[in-house]
Image (cartoon, helix red, strand yellow):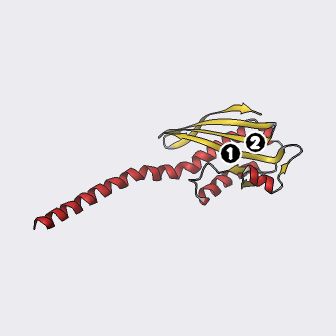
């Protein structure tokens, strides 16, 4: 009888503690649903800085290498949001652009703009995103964007150029 009672007690404790574990996971799910908004705002802020790099661009390429947590659907949503710049938007790294013949060795440039995020720091209501916007060896900038969450909506607080080539 004692063994049965101990068994039931262990089962109840297991159910209670496994239920508590699920509550800790839920905030990550909520945060996951916000990533498209956060990265879309960040990439838009990149495009708004040094607009001279945008002149005559034929495409926007996004390097998602450092954003491996994104699903294909999330990447597509981000890509679709940048179509407002009236040029094709694609997922590509610098090396892939070179392989596709989209890099001019003589001018050290591409005919579009390559956006890249290489660092993300996040708290519950603030995000700092560091990345770059590349057009050529002599036409690129480092960008740092600060986003804040106001009443459940992410907003750009500030974007600044951190380096120029």
* SS of the residue under disc 1: strand
Nearest to the observer: residue 6 or residue 84: 6
Q: Image quadrant of residue 121?
A: top right
Measured in 3D between alpha carbons, the distance from the residue under mark 2 to the one under mark 1, in whole angstroms, is: 8 Å
**Which disc, if any, is residue 150?**
none
**Which disc, if any, is residue 116?**
1
Identify the residue shown where x is 18% and y is 60%.
9
Q: Is residue 7 above or below residue 111?
A: below
Q: Are marks 2 and 1 in contact (CB under 8 Å)?
A: yes
Identify the residue shown where x is 35% and y is 54%.
21
Nearest to the observer: residue 121 or residue 149: 121
Q: Image quadrant of residue 72?
A: bottom right
**Mark nearer the N terminus (2 vs 1):** 1
Provide the residue designation for mark 2. Answer: 134
The quarter of the rendered structure image containing the N terminus is bottom left
Farthest residue in the front direction?
3
Nearest to the observer: residue 122 or residue 148: 122
Q: Please provide percent x and percent y for residue 77.
A: 63, 55
The quarter of the rendered structure image containing the C terminus is top right
- Left or right: 95 with respect to 7? right
Crowd band around label 1 with a 10 angstrom C-alpha radius: few (<14), some (14–19), many (20+): many
């Amino acid at each position: 009888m004692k063994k049965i009672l101990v068994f039931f007690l262990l089962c109840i404790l297991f159910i209670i503690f496994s239920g508590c574990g699920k509550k800790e996971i839920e905030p990550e799910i909520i945060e996951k649903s916000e990533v498209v908004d956060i990265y879309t705002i960040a990439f838009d802020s990149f495009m708004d800085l040094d607009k001279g790099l945008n002149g005559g661009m034929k495409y926007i390429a996004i390097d998602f290498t450092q954003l491996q947590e994104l699903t294909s659907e999330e990447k597509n949503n981000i890509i679709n949001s940048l179509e407002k710049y009236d040029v094709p938007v694609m997922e590509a790294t610098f090396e892939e652009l070179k392989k596709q013949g989209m890099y001019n060795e003589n001018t050290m440039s591409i005919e579009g703009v390559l956006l890249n995020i290489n660092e993300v720091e996040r708290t519950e209501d603030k995000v700092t995103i560091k990345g770059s916007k590349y057009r050529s060896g002599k036409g690129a900038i480092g960008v740092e964007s600060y986003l804040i969450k106001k009443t459940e909506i992410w907003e750009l607080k500030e974007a600044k150029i951190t380096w120029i080539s």
